[in-house]
Structure formats: structure tokens, C-alpha cells
Image (cartoon, rainbow, N blue to C red):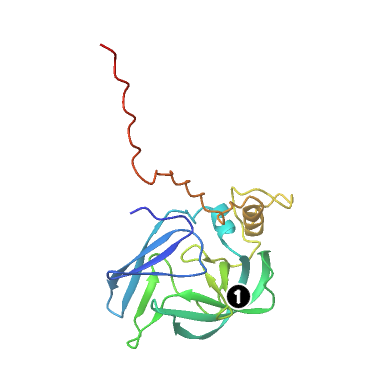
Amino acid sequence: MILKRKTVLIAAGAALAVVAGIGGSVLYQEVNQRNEAATTSHAALIYEADFSDDANLAGAAEDLFYGKVTALKGQKDLGTGPETQYAVEVQRVFKGDVTGVVVVNQQGGKDENGDIVNLPEEDALLEVGKRYLFATKYNPDHRFNTVIPVYGDMPIPHTEAAAPGVPDMDGDGQPTMSDRWTAAVQNQNDLSTASPDEEPTEEPDEDPIPESSPTSSS
């Protein structure tokens, strides 16, 4: 299957549903993992846009910021399985205009048995009290910021944590997480423009009538 860039699909059984507001091409396929305590239903991710690349993640996000999860707000099912909302105190903004305390929405939640379901593979539910780098898209209908799965909710103890190998953006000789995400925004890839559609080839309304060849004189 060829996925168009910037389209997000969720596969639940044989059904496909478009999830609005998240950039990058992602196909989710439900996978169950069991342990002694509970069942976690994950979603295996296949990307066309590689969000492990900071420049892609920054380009896909409307808001890229660092913040602390202060409270669990609730859970909703928007038609593709449970999603969980958290109150997040914004502490540093790298891209966008979020301020104060915002509601952050994450795909995944818990069912009536307390099992974690609909959670993308390699992702984990946010934890109250922890700090993260958030890459999000704003959902105006529900007034929350939805994180880009897996890479859009990265645990970071603080923005001045060491980040070896990244550009030293502020020139203090100590590359940090702040430098990493400042550089990501500065070098972000534009994921907003899809490739132009090919112009259709015009077909004649009907086959032309062949011209009769001239008759030769005897």
C-alpha cells in the first residue's frame, strides 16, 4: 500500500478512519501484548514521514514546547478508540504560541478493565508530575493539543539536560536539549505541502475517422 504524505490512518480490523490534526503518514495496526498485571493493546506504526528526525517532527508540529504534566483531565473516545487528556504547564516554547496551562490529548487510554488500549507501539501514557518535550497539533473542535504519537511526547528532565552531538545554538559550549529543539525548529522540514497532482492526459471524445488514401491513376 502506498500512503500519501501527511495522511494519518488508523486501522481497526478491516475499517480505516482518518484522524484529523496529526501530520505525517502513519498506519496503525492493533497489536495485543499481555503481561501478568494487565493487557496493553498497542498500535504498530509505519511511517512515510520519519518523526525520529527532529527536523520532520518540528515541521509537522504546530506547537513544539516543553512542559510538566500537572493533572489527568479525563478520557474521550472520538470514534477510533480512547484518547486521554492531561493538564500541562507550559515551561518553554520552541514553536507556536501556547502559554500557561494547556490541555494535551494523547491517543490511547484504559478500558473498563483498566487495561491500556489503542496506544501506539513504543509509546507510553503520559505520567503526572513528569516533564516532556511535546510536539502537537491543535484540535479546535475540542480545544486541546494532540501529541504526535511516540516522538511527540519525549520525556526530558529539564531543557538544560545535556544533548551531546547537537549544535551549540547559544554558544555557551554546552549543547543541551534547548539547543537541540531550537536547531530542529530552525532547520524544520516543510511537511505541509503535498506533491502536486499530475495533470490528466486529455483523451479525445471519440476515435478520429481515418482519412481515405488517394486512389492512384491506372
Judge from the rendering whether residue 39 lies leftward or rightward of residue 52; answer left or right: left
Above or below residue 177? Residue 137 is below
Say what amino acid the circle numbered 1 marks: Lys
At 74% across and 49% down in the image, what residue appears?
171
| Residue at the spot of label 1 | 68
Q: Position of residue 63 (x, y in %)?
A: 62, 66
Q: How many marks?
A: 1
Q: Quadrant of the N terminus?
A: bottom left
Q: Is residue 82 above or below residue 157?
A: below
Task: Farthest residue to the right: give it.
Answer: 171
Q: Quadrant of the C terminus?
A: top left
**What residue lies at 55% left-to-right and 58% top-to-bottom?**
57
Q: Where is residue 176 shown, x and y percent of the image?
A: 64, 56
Q: Is residue 207 above or below residue 25?
A: above
* Label 1: element kind: strand
Q: What residue is drawn where x is 29% and y is 15%?
A: 216
Residue 107 sits in which quadrant?
A: bottom left
Name of the residue lying farthest toward the bottom: 112
Disc 1 crowd, CA 10 A, few/some/many (<14, 14-19, 20+):
many
Observer-nearest residue: 128 or 104?
104
On screen, residue 162 versus residue 7, left or right, reads right
Residue 115 vertical placement versus 65 (above, below): below
Which image quadrant for residue 45? Answer: bottom left
Question: x and y percent of residue 119 in the render?
Answer: 39, 72
Q: Is residue 126 visible?
A: no
Residue drawn where x is 69% and y is 69% of the image: 97
Would residue 100 be found to the left or right of residue 192 on screen?
Answer: right
**Residue 79 in sight:** yes
Would residue 88 appear left or right of 114 to someone viewing this image?
right
